[in-house]
Amino acid sequence: MSRTIVLLACLGLPGLVAVLAPAGAAVPGPAAGAALERARGIEGQRQADLGDGTFLNPILAGDHPDPSVLRDGDDYYLTLSSFDAYPGLPLWHSRDLVNWQPVGHAITTSVGSIWAPDLVRHEGRYYIYFPGRTDAGRSNYVVWADDIRGPWSEPVDLHLPDHIDPGHAVGEDGERYLFLSGGDYVQLADDGLATAGEVKHVYDGWRYPEEWVVESYSQEGPKITRHDGWYYMITAVGGTAGPPTGHMVIVARSRSIHGPWENDPNNPVVRTESVDEQWWSRGHATLVEDAAGQWWMMYHGYERGFWTLGRQALLEPVEWTDDGWFVARGGDLGHPLPKPAGDAIGRHGMALSDDFDADRLGHQWAFYSPGADEMARISFEEGALVLQGKGETPRDASPLTAIAGDQAYQVEVEMEIEPGAVGGALLFYSDRLYAGLGSNGKDFIMHRYGEERPARLAPGPGGRLWLRLTHDRHVLTIHHSRDGRNWEKYGVQMEVSGYHHNTVGRFLSLRPGIYAAGDGRVRFHAYRYRALD
């Protein structure tokens, strides 16, 4: 029978309850609308580690979709889809699968929107395989490095325009292969930097009951794991977004990398079954073994009611069964679970605040849909980020954004707006949906629904302006100041719960950001982020 443990005053969270289930038992999540007690880390941001040997999902809060995890000795490394954000392919490091710290990025040269990558190590070298998509078309690419921290190579085009979501594998013949969406695969050259044959079909997938409510079939994200003489293919079907019950994880196995592939009779191994669960659209999994021999799945899901946060990284224990399959043991992930083996490497995550006192862009920042020379817009002068204007509005200005994983937070920034420039602070989803406030030093420019609406503003001294954005569970309130001490509330508040993929597509998230448009420059000082209760 299940047992309930009451954790008293854990990390200052009195009354936190963890429900731990025996193997095979389903663990119910909290009732819809119920608040979960969570641990807080840097800047009050959500963290998974509860400090008592348990963790509470998400592992990486905020938009961390399609996670690919590599175990490398005592270390784990992770990368994920970065879509239209550059620098792209962010890299994270952990020693316990729960506490993660940023390492850097694997790509700065834009190849378009980057989708589900696969991070592997082969014969001492690291590789990331990934698809890139532009308006002109798409292909699959690879970057490589001899040190996970870089430098990374320029992207190499594998000339595979008809597939997404590559997954690397080494066959029983010692050859390298790349598995692709739709159940196809192709042999790679020995160096992994080119294909060595034709694409072949090897797996037809698994079909769910017709009455299930899903987005689409969308067989994608194949990841290959070898265990006890079997190859296991972990695949996503059901569509990534859309209805909360759509996305799922299915498994097939084969003695040979070339098939035939046998479906798990208990498919799917992971699926959101009800909109009342804490995590929606769960899928796109990678298997990884910890130092104690326990196996885990890392995958993504939307938090109930918060599509705006994007697909967040989730961790679930699995157990191998006597018949050679595995089953998920985390229930709906709505309660704390025992942590994996391993030691934390330090404080989880990173600060989103920035004093701009370094001579490089911080790990937290990325341009949206940048041009080839985007980094040339940036300079650092006396504790300020100086950003050359681009375009006319946030729509074509390639804003700088950061991934936020909290349901409520506040950001502040000080700006000096040069003549000819427009600067501002935003909640930015894409060039089609954003909200916030900008200024040209004389007039406010309100951004709402991805549109601009000018309004009068008495200019501050020297074009200096402070902005504060408070995003409280989809309600945006804006304050402005001329001195950073006395604040005035802007007259329009906005509701942004619809700023997500199911409204305008793109599989992105709503992120805090800053922008500079026009012909002049904007100097940004003292960007501050803090999570709210």
Image (tube, rainbow, N blue to C red):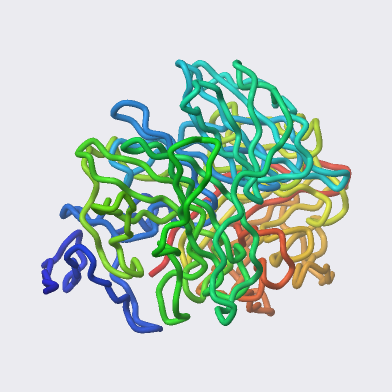
Residue 461 percent across, percent down from the top left: 72, 53
Quadrant position of the N terminus in the picture: bottom left
Quadrant position of the C terminus in the picture: bottom left
> From the viewer's perspective, is 274 left or right of 322?
right
Tell me what residue is drawn at x 28 percent, y 53 percent: 323
> From the viewer's perspective, is 443 left or right of 283?
right
Tell me what residue is drawn at x 54 percent, y 63 percent: 309
Tell me what residue is drawn at x 49 percent, y 21 percent: 174
The total number of labels drawn is: 0
Residue 195 percent across, percent down from the top left: 70, 25
Which residue is nearer to you in this view: 368 or 71? 71
Residue 61 percent across, percent down from the top left: 44, 56
Would residue 524 be visible to someone looking at this image? Answer: no
> From the viewer's perspective, is 242 left or right of 247?
right
Would residue 286 be visible to someone looking at this image? Answer: yes
Residue 136 percent across, percent down from the top left: 88, 44
Tell me what residue is drawn at x 49 percent, y 54 percent: 529
